[in-house]
Image (spheres, rainbow, N blue to C red):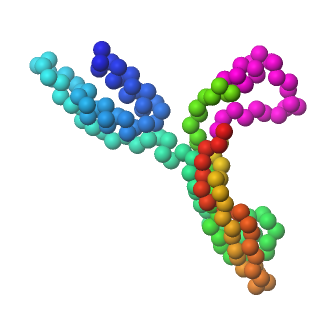
Amino acid sequence: MRSLLKLVVLLFCVQRGEGHWMRSLLGSGFGVEDQRGSVPSPAPIIPIRSRRSSTQCRLRSILLQVRELGLGYDADETVLFKYCSGDCPRVRSNHDLTLTNLLLRGALPEQNGELWQNGPCCRPTHHEDLAFLDNAHRWHKVEKLSAAGCTCVG
């Protein structure tokens, strides 16, 4: 029964992308029975890369020319633009459960095709200013242009 419980937890962790739990489960005596049917031997530990590691909410960056920012500046200078991107864990609160229930029952009025957002999203926690020299040799400072940190909001 204990091995079955470990297997269920193991499958749940793998499904959620929490590969680090697998090592602790496999290292605690969860293994394949010996051919003689006696003492279980530990199964080989296979490192599992979390599938969420590359898609989780984090700060990313891209090199762009200032004119590619779309702010109307004529500058050939290349800058590092930082932004937030990625998935956020979906933790259902009582508000989310109630909102879903009301939407399914049709108890909330429609807002002219407006979509309801009930999931968290990856957003900047604070921003950085950016200074650059345009093609006419004038300095410009754009406030709060690049993200400086990210978190899941909502």
Question: Looking at the image, can residue 76 be seen?
Answer: no
Residue at 58%, 42% (x, y): give it: 87
Residue at 76%, 22% (x, y): give it: 103
- Look at the image and say whether residue 108 sits in the magenta stretch: yes
Q: Is residue 72 above or below residue 43?
A: below
Total tally of numbered discs in the picture: 0
Where does the magenta region start and end? 97-120
Residue located farthest toward the front when viewing the structure as drawn: 94
* Residue 78 falls left or right of residue 67: left
- Look at the image and say whether residue 32 sits in the magenta stretch: no
Q: Quadrant of residue 81?
A: bottom right
Q: Position of residue 148 (x, y in %)?
A: 61, 60
| Foreground pick, 39 / 2 | 2
Residue located farthest toward the right when viewing the structure as drawn: 112
Q: Position of residue 137 (x, y in %)?
A: 76, 85
Residue at 35%, 34% (x, y): give it: 22
Q: Quadrant of the C terminus?
A: top right
Residue at 66%, 64% (x, y): give it: 128
Question: Looking at the image, can residue 102 be seen?
Answer: yes
Q: Is residue 120 above or below residue 136?
A: above
* Residue 47 falls left or right of residue 141: left
Q: Is residue 1 above or below residue 115?
A: above
Q: Quadrant of the N terminus?
A: top left
Q: Position of residue 107 (x, y in %)?
A: 81, 18
| Foreground pick, 77 / 127 | 127
Name the chief secondary structure element in magenta: loop
Q: Position of residue 147 (x, y in %)?
A: 64, 59
